[in-house]
Amino acid sequence: MNQYPWWKNAFIGLIVVLGLIYALPNLYGDNPAVEIQATHGARVNDATVARVRRLLAAAHLPYKHIGRVAKGVQVRFRRAGVQMRARDLIGQKLGPGFHTALALAPADPSWLRALGARPMYLGLDLRGGVHFLLRVDMHAALHKALVEDTRALRRALRHRHIRYREARLTKTGVVKLRFRNAAQTHEARRLMTQRFTDLAVTSGSHNPNTLRAVMTPAAIAARQHYALEQNLTALRRRVNELGVAAPVIQQEGQSRIVVELPGVEDIARAKEILGRTATLEIHMVDSKNSLATAVSNGAPPGTRIYDNRHGQPILLYDRVLYSGDDITNASAGVDPQTGQPVVNITLNGRGAAINARVTRRNVGQRMAVVYVEVQSHLKRNDQGVPIRGPDGRRERVTRKIERVITAPVIREALGGSFQITGIGSVRQARNLSLLLRAGALAAPVSIIAERTVGPSLGAANITRGFYATLFGFLAIAVFITVYYRTFGVLAAIALATNVVLLVAVLSVLQATLTLPGIAGIALTVGMAIDANVLIFERIREELRNKNSPQAAIATGFDKAMGTIVDSNMTTFIAGLALFWLGSGSVRGFAVTLCLGILTSLFSAIVVTRALVNAVYGRRRRLARVDI
Amino acid sequence: MEFFRIKRDLPFMRYARTTVFVSLVLFAAAVAALVARGLNLNVDFTGGTVIELQFKAATPASAIRRLLVTHHYRHARVENYGTASKVLIRLPTRATKGKALAVRVLRLVSAHYPGTNLRSVEYVGPEVGSELADQGALALLFVALGITIYLTVRFEWRFAVGAIVATIHDVVIVLGVFAFFHISFSLTVLAAVLAVLGYSVNDTVVVFDRIRENFRRMRTGTTAEIIDSAITRTLSRTVMTHLLTQMMVLSMLFLGGPVLFGFALAMTIGIVVGTYGSVLVASPIVMWLGLKREDLVARKAAAERP
């Protein structure tokens, strides 16, 4: 009669078991933790652990676990509030030489992780953290590109011996060129159409010996794309520097970037690092003039005194040979002959040409890599309130930081790739290569929106979401059991399966769970029961029409099927539109809604049917069903 | 247990004019509320102010919230941030009066907690907000369009029109309630409104599906009778489903906390209005658009499922 073949039951069983396993890690969650690391001079050892334990006990701060981890000491807590107070306490009492940081330690057992089962990723509204929406200044990016183009154009013209009277870039982004005669104008135009395909050239309207060039729309699009890509890369590297667990850095639209930093509580530092416009400059070291004289009497013309990273002065020539923009790649390594850490640098064509020329002439001299950073802060009055200019905008103060990273001796003429040696440690080499790779932001960014959720609010949101779903679920389960009796119990089991499967799918996809996402799960539970109601009402109807119970069950499921698919399809469409147009937490809701529809179709139709079959399917002569 | 043991079909269509009239009145009231009062858009859409305060000692967020609420900052959201002595206050603002606002808040707080420092004041840019509003409207439009196309293909154009009109009616009434009571309208509420859209159509489709089936099964009977029969036979399911979904949503409304409150409220209203709309608005429209047996039976061969 109503029976699934054994393999179908086995398949359903397998899916449910897999669902249980992959949903399980979410029950363990994360523990708020404080990590203590030694910075300079100090050492982390068992004595440190004992000290921290005494400190926490004296302040009556309960903790779950304390122990040594790879990087230092980790203390796990049950609540985020305790974690913060403990961090303040430890930070104060442990003294200098130790660095304390907030962290989240996953609490799930290792056998689950071995199976690849991971908890869902919690969104900012549940975990706490900072969300930034950055706007990339495309105008500045295009201007920078045009400046480079103009410079290259001048060089090319000189190279071809085309004399120009004027070659300048206007503020509106037009390259204006003026020549002596028509022949040179013509030749310049040919050169530009051949080699400067980024520029669209037109003749000047007044003077036939002038040319006007603007960037082509295609080139503008390409430049903007490049600027965005490079900024994304640079930001990603910077966030890695911040040491944030599982950050989100995504493009949004044509000129915006979303940065989400879960668990970051130091907004000021996060902002500072994100907006940092750092680059590198390569200078020659002045070995002719005496450093001591320069320090006491001031630097001779054409030179400047810089500090290296140990704070010692070094005399460099003003002229920038080439900058970080010309570096295409950098990687850390070890010199196979000396065993010393090195950084391998690859330059672009322009950088390579300059490098070859300069190093050929200066073997034995020193070359300096200077780290340049422009920091920008809001200008504040005594109360710390930002000062506004006459136009209402907040005024900013900028500060330029320049520091010599390394000043190695040139041993031989170099080309497009070379090594920087004398760096110190492998770790420093890695940092330097990272900095060189991350490079400067291609275009400045500004924060146009910022959202922050404290960890205390996040924890409260999880609890609320969980209890709301739980009580809603229990109410539904009790109600359908009363209303549909045995079938109601089966539907409640199927409904629980639905929640487990949905959580499992979300975990496997490593989706971000947000509070609206929890609402999505809760809503799916409410809507999943609709399929069961449709089926059960059909079965009742068939029974009322004097069909045999077994036939009623079979027809009920079959007839309800089409309705269920049609009605769920429309909600699915709504979910897709939400996903497509929504952002952040709304998108989280859309994902759970869409996936929830799919899992609910499985649980409400297939799982319920299997359960009904198991209870009633075997009996050939079924007098009545309990519905 | 069974709530509905209805022997004879209930004559819903006889009262179609009345039920649709009631809907029209509600709809007009909702539009009036939207025009007169407008939606109380929150920080997500309008931009707003975020104030970070540093206290001398650990200060619970709830104490500051109480202080602010008693001093006319009813919408202030307060929480501890970073350390227990740092507090973050968020206030929705219409204009960018952020600086003055921050100073006022600081003055108020430091009168009760001397030595409090203002750490930062931040705004959510208004351009971001207006863009989100545009995207929301666009999402509504696309959902409506997608559903219309789906229903036209799966059913018939009259059904698509009926469903969309009923759905727009539901959504506008939900928005109207938010406008009338001046309830904060956030991005999450917008998500709920879109979910209402899908949910409401979902419900309409169940009734339509039965209407289509009835046309094929019942050889006699006027369109009105056939629709009456379809509504009556699905009534039990309609009420049950709504009751069950409503339980979940009410659980969110009471237990979900302030963030989910708006979401749950929109869903609560949406479910009630949606039930009414799908049964008593969508079906009369299909009837008035002149649906006949031939419209569906002619397609029988093509559309019939195995």
Image: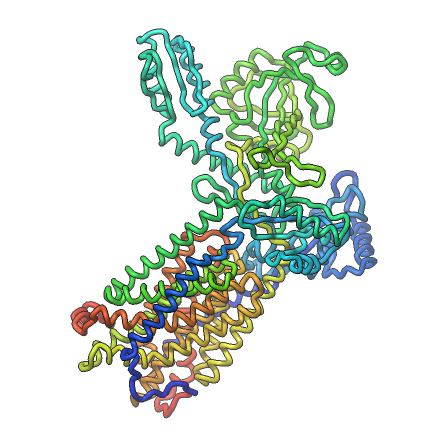
Q: Residue furthest bottom?
A: A623
Residue beneath the point at 46% across and 55% down: A587
Give percent across and percent down for residue A187.
33, 12
| Horizontal arrangement in the rendering, residue A423 relative to residue B306 (left or right) | right
Q: Say if residue A15 shows up in the picture.
A: no
Q: Position of residue B294 (x, y in %)?
A: 16, 72
Q: Relative to B303, does residue A85 appear above or below in the rendering?
A: above
Instruction: Give the left or right position of residue B215, taking residue A491 as reference.
Output: left
B102, above or below A206, in the image: below
Residue A401 appears in the figure: yes
Give the image quarter of residue A81: bottom right
Q: Residue at x 36, y 28 (%)?
A: A216
Query: Where the C terminus of chain A falls, by quadrant?
Result: bottom left
Q: Image quarter for residue B140?
A: bottom left
Task: Tell me residue A176's x, y (percent).
Answer: 40, 17
Residue A467: where, in percent of width, then height? 58, 69
Residue A292 vs residue B280, the one in the foreground: B280
Of the 4 image quadrants, the one containing the N terminus of chain A is: bottom left
> Residue at point 73% right, 26% down?
A311
